[in-house]
């Protein structure tokens, strides 16, 4: 063990019992990264605090002894926000995973940061309530990470983002101060709401240790339709046809290439008899089936939709959802270069056309998987690596395209990261979505909350 590593372990030992620290190479590899694979994984240690007091002590030690901390949840992020490449100490919230309180009157559940999203969803269901933020990684993502990235997912069109469900937070700032923010209040007009500053701050301002999460009334059982839509630009007309007649819980889309990838990867069947260039997936309350059937018939009459299927059971609804939710995993072997873009919903059709044109003219030899949460304006653009191209050359060619794609986003005041966060992957492109004035204020906030830059340095901001 090198002297500095021994010093680090001594410093950590002042904050947290030695049994809760690991320097095992396998643990460092596991805990030092997220789902991105482009960065070196090189943390010095991983620690597993069990209490708020231990988190406070860790941050104070980091300031005193000059080491850096990388907060780590379920490590399902796609932007490198939880990657430790520079000898940092990873702070895993795996052992702070209790649902520590529930109040039926307030419909609030108090979760430690390490509660797995699916466990919160199951807990809500046991109370006859509903936690509506949902995505493919719910089985492993943590509520703390969801808050730190303001995670979105598949039901944003109806229920909003993680931000909309956070009624209170406990956070340890970069100076080791424990803050209680908003305490579950519905109304609170006492100035700056620091809770909202923490949401989406990617661990750069404070470490979230627990949260009061709102729960919704349990929804009706849901029906799912998958529709064949030949033209990308008709997808929004289909959405409007549905929204004029009913409230949709989700409106997603994917291209035929995405479908073929999922079918090759999983034991599922094609939803429609004939292949179609694009598919829409619509979810809605079962009591709206008639209204949804009207919308479908109207969209067929208009020629926007050529075929469709509606779920007849919960199991069928789940397998239709699997066609959409399985895409990311199914294309992982193709080393996709990911972009997670958002514009206003009304700007989606012409934005899609403009980006598609950029991609086709610049990547004639690359396969492109388009999919995402089109109903809320969020599109996932995944470029697949040709087998014979090296990862380095592929990434370089994709990066060379980013300025022209991001210029299309900027022209529409859109976002270069709708729901995956900034982390390392999007940090140097932030200027396409944030003005120089905003970026300067963000740097100022970082300095205020974390003057020695001990929290997730180099992520989100340089
Ligand atoms: C999804 O919507 C996730 O499936 C992942 O946000 C998207 O892998 C992606 O690009
Ligand atoms: Zn998504």
Image (cartoon, helix red, strand yellow):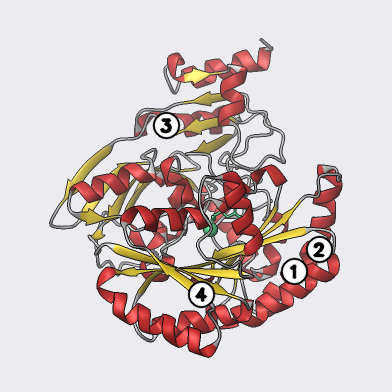
> Badge 2: few (under 14), some or many (20 or more) residues near its Cα, within 10 Å?
some
Along the line of sight, the residue nearer the viewer: 38 or 167: 38
Quadrant in the rendering for residue 89: top right
Q: Position of residue 54 (x, y in %)?
A: 39, 28
* Label 3: element kind: loop
Q: Answer yes or no: do the residues labelled 1 and 4 have beta carbons within 8 Å?
A: no
| Residue ID for mark 3 | 94
CB-based contact (under 8 Å), mark 4 and mark 2: no
> Is 291 or 351 nearer to us in this picture?
291
Query: Residue placed farthest to the bottom in the image?
Result: 302
Q: Earlier in the sequence, mark 4 or mark 2?
A: 4
Q: Which mark is residue 254?
A: none
Label 3 crowd bin: few (<14), some (14–19), many (20+), radius 10 Å: many
Q: Residue at x 65, y 43 (%)?
A: 36
On-image quarter of the N terminus = top right
3 vs 4, front mark: 4
Is the C-beta separation of discs 2 and 1 under 8 Å? yes
Residue 440 at least partly seen: no
Which residue is at 54% across, 66% downward? 273
Residue under numbered circle 1? 405
> Which residue matches tag 2?
401
Q: Tell me the CA gap for discs 1 and 4.
A: 32 Å
Q: Nearer the viewer, mark 1 or mark 4?
A: 4
The residue carrying pointer 4 sits among few (fewer than 14), some (14 to 19) or many (20 or more) residues within 10 Å by Cα, namely many
Q: Which label's residue is closer to the chain start, 3 or 4?
A: 3
Residue 223 in the image, given as x and y percentages of width and height: 34, 65
Do tag 1 and tag 3 residues touch (Cβ < 8 Å)? no
Which residue is denoted by mark 4 in the rendering? 307
Instruction: Report how far apart the C-alphas of labels 2 and 1 lie in the structure.
Output: 6 Å
Callout in the foreground (1, 3): 1
Viewer-side label of 2, 3: 2
């Amino acid at each position: 063990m090198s002297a500095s590593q021994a010093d680090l372990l001594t410093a950590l030992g002042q904050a947290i019992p030695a049994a809760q620290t690991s320097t095992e190479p396998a643990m460092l590899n596991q805990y030092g990264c997220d789902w991105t694979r482009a960065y070196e994984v090189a943390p010095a240690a991983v620690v597993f605090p069990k209490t708020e007091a231990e988190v406070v002590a860790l941050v104070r030690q980091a300031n005193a002894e000059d080491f850096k901390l990388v907060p780590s949840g379920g490590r399902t992020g796609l932007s490198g926000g939880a990657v430790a490449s520079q000898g940092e100490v990873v702070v895993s919230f795996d052992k702070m995973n209790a649902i520590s309180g529930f109040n039926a009157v307030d419909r609030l559940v108090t979760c430690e940061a390490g509660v797995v999203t699916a466990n919160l969803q199951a807990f809500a269901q046991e109370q006859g309530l509903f936690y509506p933020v949902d995505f493919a990684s719910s089985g492993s993502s943590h509520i703390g990470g969801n808050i730190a990235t303001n995670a979105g997912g598949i039901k944003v069109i109806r229920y909003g983002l993680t931000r909309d469900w956070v009624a209170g937070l406990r956070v340890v700032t970069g100076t080791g101060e424990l803050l209680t923010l908003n305490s579950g209040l519905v109304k609170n007009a006492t100035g700056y709401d620091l809770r909202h500053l923490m949401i989406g701050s990617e661990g750069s301002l404070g470490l979230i240790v627990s949260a009061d999460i709102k729960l919704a009334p349990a929804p009706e059982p849901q029906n799912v339709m998958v529709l064949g839509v030949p033209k990308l630009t008709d997808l929004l007309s289909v959405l409007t046809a549905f929204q004029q007649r009913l409230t949709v819980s989700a409106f997603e889309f994917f291209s035929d290439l995405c479908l073929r990838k999922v079918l090759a990867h999983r034991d599922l069947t094609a939803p429609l008899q004939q292949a179609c260039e694009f598919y829409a997936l619509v979810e809605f309350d079962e009591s709206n089936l008639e209204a949804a059937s009207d919308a479908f018939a109207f969209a067929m009459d208009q020629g926007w939709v050529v075929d469709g299927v509606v779920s007849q059971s919960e199991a069928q609804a789940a397998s239709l959802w699997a066609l959409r939710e399985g895409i990311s995993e199914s294309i992982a072997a193709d080393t996709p270069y990911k972009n997670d873009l958002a514009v206003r919903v009304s700007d989606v059709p012409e934005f899609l056309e403009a980006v598609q044109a950029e991609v086709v003219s610049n990547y004639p030899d690359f396969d492109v998987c388009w999919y995402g949460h089109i109903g809320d304006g969020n599109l996932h653009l995944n470029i697949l690596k040709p087998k014979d191209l090296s990862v380095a050359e592929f990434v370089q060619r994709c990066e060379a395209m980013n300025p022209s794609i991001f210029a299309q986003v900027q022209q529409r005041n859109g976002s270069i990261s709708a729901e995956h966060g900034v982390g390392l992957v999007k940090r140097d492109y932030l200027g396409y979505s944030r003005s120089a004035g905003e970026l300067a204020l963000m740097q100022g906030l970082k300095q205020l909350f974390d003057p020695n830059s001990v929290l997730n340095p180099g992520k989100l901001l340089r």
